[in-house]
Amino acid sequence: MRTKKSSELISASGLVTLMTHAMMGAALGLTFGLTLVLSNPAVANLLNNGGSQAVLVFALTLVTTFAVGATLTGVVFIIDEDKKS
């Protein structure tokens, strides 16, 4: 009978992996926001006329969305690796 090993998701290395995924998502969100502003003059104009609050909300929305998505993807990857081993 096999012994049940604990999930790698609930370990120190699992948390570090999830943090890494979240940081990659945040960086990807910032990169996407910069690309969007540089490639679409309408977005740049909206942010220019909206003030500093608009820029902050725009950046935080993109960073949070991409970071949460990347973290959830990391959870799926870790669970899939646990099932294979």
Image (tube, grey):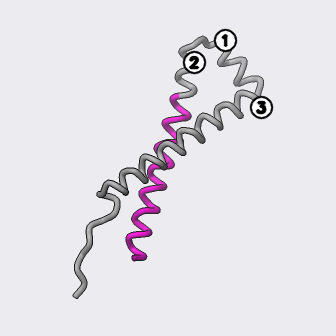
Assess whether residue 82 is covered by the magenta stretch. yes
CA–CA distance in space, label 3 to label 2: 18 Å
Q: Is residue 15 above or below residue 62?
A: below
Which residue was labeled with disc 3?
A: 39
Amino acid at pointer 2: Ala
Residue 13 horizontal side relative to residue 65, left or right = left
Give the residue at x 60% y 11%: 51
Give the residue at x 42% y 76%: 84
Q: Quadrant of residue 36?
A: top right
Count of marks placed on residues: 3
Q: Quadrant of residue 78?
A: bottom left
Taking depth in this image into account, of 10 and 57 the one nearest to the observer is: 10
User: Picture coordinates of residue 54 (x, y %)?
Assistant: 57, 18
Q: Which numbered circle lies on residue 54?
A: 2
User: What kind of secondary structure does the magenta stretch mostly adopt?
Assistant: helix
Sequence-wise first label, 1 or 3:
3
Taking depth in this image into account, of 70 and 6 the one nearest to the observer is: 6
User: Picture coordinates of residue 23 (x, y %)?
Assistant: 50, 42
Q: Residues within 10 Å of mark 3 (few under 14, many from 20)?
A: few
Amino acid at pointer 1: Asn
Give the quarter of the figure containing the N terminus.
bottom left
Give the quarter of the figure containing the C terminus.
bottom left
Taking depth in this image into account, of 19 and 73 the one nearest to the observer is: 19
Please provide the residue range marked out in magenta. 60-85
User: Picture coordinates of residue 20 (x, y %)?
Assistant: 47, 48
CA–CA distance in space, label 1 to label 3: 17 Å
Q: Which numbered circle lies on residue 49?
A: 1
Sequence-wise first label, 3 or 2:
3
Q: Is residue 35 above or below residue 19?
A: above
Q: Which secondary structure lies at badge 1?
A: helix
